[in-house]
Amino acid sequence: MLDGRYRIEERIARGGMATVYTAVDTRLDRQVAVKVMHEGLGADQDFADRFVREARASARLNHPGVVAVFDQGEDEGTVYLVMEYVAGATLRDVIRKEAPLTPARALAVMEQVLQALGAAHQAGLVHRDVKPENVLIAPTGQIKVADFGLARAVTSTTAVTATAGVLIGTISYVAPELVLHQGTDARSDVYACGVLLFELLTGRKPHEAENPIQVAYKHVHEDVPAPSSFQPGIPHYLDALVARATARDRDLRPTDAKLMLQQTRRVAIALGQGITDDPDLVADLSPTTSIWTEPTVAEPWDILVFEDQDQQATNQAARRAEHTAVTPVAGGGPPVPRPGPSTAQSRSAIRSRRGAVLLVLVLLLAVVAALAGWQLGVGRYTDVPEVSGLSLTEADAMAAAAGLSVTVADERFDEAVPLDHVISSSPEAGGSVLEGGSIEVAVSLGKERYRVPDVVGLPLPEAEAKIRDAGLTSTEPVDKFNRRYDAGVVTDISIASGSMVKPDVQLELEVSKGRLPIDVPDTSGRARAAAERLLDEARLVAVVDEVYDDAVPSGRVISQEPDGGTAFKGDQIMIVVSLGPEVVEVPEVIAAGVDAATDELEMLGFVVETHHSDQYLGLGYVLEQSVSPGDAAPYGSVIVLSLI
């Protein structure tokens, strides 16, 4: 907890001067970004005083393109700045992944950057550290410029101030007047914007060298190249816009970001209209011819200011050698004394030699002082090499070559970066870190993939738990009837088990509702064939039983089992089909005794009736039968016997 209000959560960046964290403002319940100055800088009272003044100036800026400053304070010696939290990437990320950008897109980016800087310039504030790392891109695409006034608060890091003699800012974007400690104004920011536009268009910095001193030397002595020399097809009027913004003579640059914004919009309009060549626009934008006087002292150490004692010694030496002229050497060598005209013929040769020796000693002292200042200021810091995309082994080697080490601060999955390769570094490439320091890197675990478990045949709760354990999720299950599986059991999955899938893939499950119920049709009274067809269409199986029936015609269904309700596919339905009445062949019982004849006929299912014939004699024998012998009669029918 910082100052009893800001709950620090996660570190998101680390630079040579400060570390940035996400935090929660517990008082207002909002997410913020907190920049905490490194302990050594925070203890510097001069730094702290300047930091407070510049933080207050930044807080007065109210522009949608400027990262808002909410608070500034000190907590037990820790100097901090509370700012608006902007989720997303930096322009450095975009350059690293996508540069060179199309001219239209590069101009669109610069338009938003210049709008923000224009508001600052109008408020009398100079940024002094315009670079891709300080341009944030929100997920909505809105661009915001960060760190207003922060660079100006530093007295011992990386750009020239008029009083301390040390560089403040990032050397790749520093204006010549800062190197020559000639003061700074809005045109210094314009220069940095020109360099930034060049980098967006080409994917590289205009001045590259082995060390920061050489880069600073190039800012003073070399013009920024035309972007079209690296990316053919860029219109000459866009080259002219870059040349105007990066003119080494600041009097030739736009006076502030607002004027450069107007020029940028003119170029964007011409580009949008498909104009490939516009000599008038080129002429308007090109820096006019100006006498650029090369600095008389052009060694790399001249970007540092001598301490007061050294400066006094130099001034004294200059007065003693008032008749000695100093001529700059092409290519920036140290000043070479040459004899000037003298009317004092009596000056002795030994005195001349003594003056020359004294001048050489003074220059050597100046060199030693400058190198000492460089070592205590810029020299303490090393440029961070580009390690993103390298394997961890390659990153270690790259860092070791720069006198640094690599610390793995984070390991996470990444779709684009292979396993065990560096995703990003903190500080980022081009940033500064103390000599012998460490670069913290995030290392890729490769593509995040999870194996689909085998859940078919499992009850739904068990299947869902198994999917969660595998690191995956599933959608709302789809219920379907299924003959093979009981209700509530998973019957199918949208992706085959064993497949490797992304974590955001949602698996679709089908779950059994059990067997499909079928309404049993009524077949009673139907012909047998019609009944069997009806059951077959209902995907039921008819089982037929045939019986004699006196009431139901032959071939008709007498009854079925079950006689209604529901069944399931393939279930058997018993139907009873009539054979009609049962018939029996009538035997011959004539001349048989009445008792014997009756018994025989009743055993066959007949009903026997008897009566006396007209010739009845009381003998008790059968004289006649009502159904002739050999004929068929329905079972249970009546046969009449006539007795004699």
Image (cartoon, grey):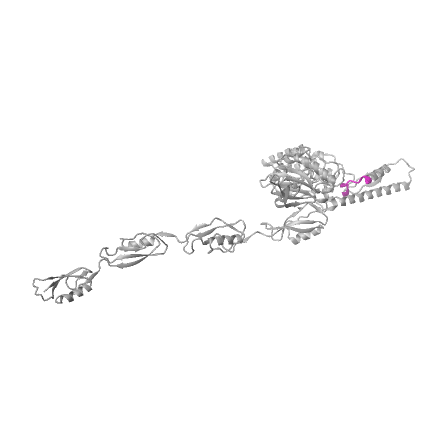
Q: Is residue 488 left or right of residue 411?
A: left
**Residue 577 quadrant:** bottom left
Instruction: Measuring from the top left, give residue 618's x and y in whole percent.
Output: 9, 65
Q: Is residue 43 left or right of residue 631?
A: right
**Residue 185 quadrant:** top right
Which residues are the magenta region?
Answer: 298-310
Instruction: Measuring from the top left, give residue 22's x and y in whole percent.
Output: 63, 43
Q: Nearer the viewer, residue 519 or 175?
A: 519
Q: Where is 217 relative to 536, above or below?
A: above
Residue at the right extreme, as displayed:
346
Instruction: Measuring from the top left, give residue 80's x and y in whole percent.
Output: 68, 41
**Residue 225 quadrant:** top right
Q: Nearer the viewer, residue 290 or 99?
A: 99
Is residue 43 visible to us here? yes
Q: Is residue 300 magenta?
A: yes
Q: Is residue 448 left or right of residue 614?
A: right
Question: Which part of the image, by quadrant, shows the C terminus?
Answer: bottom left
> Total of numbered circles in the picture?
0
Instruction: Measuring from the top left, give residue 380's x and y in whole percent.
Output: 74, 46
Question: Which part of the image, by quadrant, shows the N terminus?
Answer: top right
Is residue 589 visible to us here? no
Q: Where is 395 relative to 51, above or below?
A: below
Q: Is residue 554 magenta?
A: no
Q: Where is 48 relative to 422, above or below?
A: above
Q: Residue at x 37, y 52 (%)?
A: 517
